[in-house]
Image (cartoon, rainbow, N blue to C red):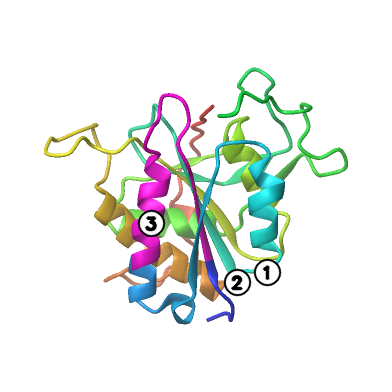
Amino acid sequence: MSRGHLLVTGFGPFPGVPVNPSAVVARRLVALARRHGLAGGDVRLLVLPTTYGAIPTHLVPALTEPPAAVLMLGVARRATRVRVEFRARNRASRLFPDASGALARCLALSADGPSERRAHVAAQALVALRCNGIRAIPSHDAGRYLCNAAYYRALAENIPVLFVHVPPLPPTGRLGLRRAPAVETLAAALVTVARGLLAGRSVHPVGGKHRENPIDAVPNRISGVL
């Protein structure tokens, strides 16, 4: 397993979402990862303010330490399933202000950056989630908002990085949103994903066999978010 700590990120509240599910799942994931001894117990949580300014002031300093791997979480408000993001694109929208009311300064996130950055660990992570009971789907569009912007910046680092969009949490005491996994179930499955990120190779699902070519099992499906 690679040396260094594991960085887990989520997002804070924003208008219409007073409790961000990504932060809820991220906190539980960190607790479980520490219990399982991932990264020697050095698992760090970063809950990002839902502002463009948080990328240079919060995310970039956390990346410069540096971590051995980064597992990023965000919420897809209209989703019913977990979405594993395969890429981030060098684009933003000036239609959606952040929680502070600020808009992206320009349509390109980086003037001299590539048009997209890909997460080479995404296919393995998708298989691991499915093998651990999560009905996850692949996504090739992380949107044009803060999730995509943060992902694009993190993927510039020479370490394993993955972004996972989670659906809204089921209401307490009810069946909740169709197919939305419970926090504990999702966090436990993400521990397996985190273990694979730290190892820098294909993931060993809990109770399952090692898969040499997990990308063969991934359907070519596109599912985007804002």
Q: Amino acid at mark 2?
A: Ala
- In this image, 220 relative to 152: left or right? left
Tag 2 residue: 68
**Crowd rating for badge 3 (residues with CA inside 10 Å; few <14, some 14–19, many 20+):** many
Report the residue at 26% width, 45% height from top.
181
Q: Is residue 125 magenta?
A: no
- Image location of residue 112, percent across then percent down: 88, 42
Nearer the observer, 37 or 185: 37
- In this image, 43 relative to 207: left or right? right
- Image location of residue 157, percent across then percent down: 71, 60
Tag 3 residue: 27
Q: Amino acid at mark 3?
A: Arg
Give the magenta range.
7-31
- Image location of residue 209, percent across then percent down: 34, 72
Quarter location, residue 160: bottom right
Callout in the foreground (2, 3): 3
Q: Amino acid at mark 1?
A: Glu
Report the residue at 27% width, 39% height from top.
180
Asked if marks 1 and 3 touch (Cβ < 8 Å), the reply is no
Cα distance, mark 1 to mark 2? 10 Å
Cα distance, mark 2 to mark 3? 19 Å
Tag 1 residue: 65
**Crowd rating for badge 1 (residues with CA inside 10 Å; few <14, some 14–19, many 20+):** few
Nearer the observer, 194 or 127: 194
Q: Of callouts 2 and 3, which one flags the residue occurring earlier in the amino acid sequence?
A: 3
Asked if marks 1 and 2 touch (Cβ < 8 Å), the reply is no
Quarter location, residue 87: top right
